[in-house]
Image (spheres, rainbow, N blue to C red):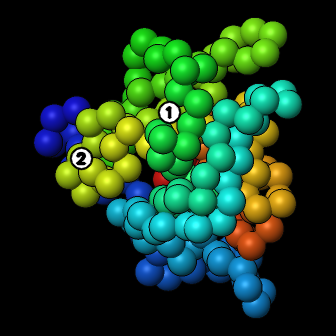
C-alpha cells in the first residue's frame, strides 16, 4: 500500500472515539464502550490470564498480553510468541494490510486431529507506531476457544475482524453488513 492509499484508508473512518454516537450502548459501571476507544488504535498492556485452546489442547497461555483498542471494535488481545506453542503454527501464504498496524501474516495450527486453517495472525513487520506488537499473535475466537480470565470470549460479528468480546465490553461492534465505515 503506497502512502496515498494509506492516507485514503485512514481517512475513511467516520468515528474516531471522540464522540460516542447516539446508537452506542451506554456502559454500566465496570464496562467499556468500544465507542470511547481511539482511532488510530491504542496499545494497552493487560495482565489478566489469556488462554487459547484447540480442542482440549492449550495453544497459548499468558498474563503478558496487550490489547489493541480501536473505535467500534472489541479489543484484540495479542500474545507474546514466548507464550504460544509456535511449533504447532504453520505460516500461510498471502496476507492483508491494516492501515494502522501494517501487513498481517496469517497462521494455521496443527491440532490433535487435524490442521485448522486461518486461526490467527501477527504483524511481523508492523508500522513504527505498532512495533511493540511485532511477532505477537492473536487468534480468532470464532475458530478457537479463547478465554480472558474465566470468561470464554465471543467473536466480533462478521467474518473478517478478530475482536474479543468479553462481558465488560459494550457496542454495537463493527463487522455486520452496513458497518464498514464505522
Q: Within the image, what quadrant is residue 149 found in?
A: bottom right
**Residue under the image location 41 percent in, 66 percent down:** 42
**Element carrying mark 1:** strand
The answer to the question of whether label 1 and label 2 lie on touching residues, with beta carbons closer than 8 A, is no
Residue behind mark 1 = 121
Between 41 and 110, the one lying in front of the other is 110
**Element carrying mark 2:** loop
**Residue under the image location 78 percent in, 15 percent down:** 112
**Residue under the image location 84 percent in, 27 percent down:** 55
Q: Position of residue 33 (x, y in %)?
A: 64, 75
Residue behind mark 2 = 127
Q: Quick one: label 1 or label 2, which is nearer the N terminus?
A: 1
**Residue under the image location 50 percent in, 82 percent down:** 19
Above or below — where is 109 with respect to 11?
above
Between 3 and 117, the one lying in front of the other is 117
Between 143 and 63, the one lying in front of the other is 63
Mark 1 closeness class: few <14, some 14–19, many ≥20 residues within 10 Å: many
Q: Position of residue 82 (x, y in %)?
A: 48, 41
Above or below — where is 181 with respect to 159?
below
Amino acid at each position: 500500500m503506497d502512502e496515498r492509499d494509506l492516507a485514503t484508508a485512514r481517512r475513511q473512518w467516520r468515528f474516531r472515539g471522540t464522540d460516542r454516537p447516539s446508537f452506542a450502548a451506554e456502559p454500566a459501571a465496570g464496562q467499556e464502550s468500544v465507542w470511547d476507544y481511539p482511532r488510530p488504535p491504542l496499545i494497552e498492556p493487560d495482565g489478566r490470564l489469556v488462554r487459547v485452546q484447540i480442542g482440549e489442547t492449550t495453544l497459548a497461555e499468558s498474563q503478558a498480553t496487550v490489547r489493541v483498542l480501536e473505535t467500534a471494535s472489541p479489543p484484540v488481545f495479542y500474545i507474546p510468541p514466548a507464550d504460544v506453542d509456535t511449533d504447532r503454527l504453520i505460516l500461510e501464504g498471502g496476507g492483508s494490510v491494516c492501515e494502522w498496524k501494517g501487513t498481517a501474516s496469517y497462521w494455521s495450527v496443527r491440532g490433535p486431529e487435524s490442521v485448522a486453517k486461518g486461526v490467527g495472525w501477527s504483524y511481523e513487520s508492523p508500522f513504527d507506531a505498532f512495533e511493540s506488537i511485532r511477532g505477537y499473535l492473536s487468534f480468532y475466537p470464532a475458530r478457537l476457544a479463547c478465554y480472558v480470565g474465566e470468561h470464554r470470549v465471543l467473536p466480533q460479528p462478521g467474518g473478517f475482524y478478530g475482536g474479543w468480546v468479553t462481558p465488560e465490553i459494550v457496542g454495537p461492534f463493527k463487522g455486520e453488513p452496513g458497518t464498514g465505515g464505522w
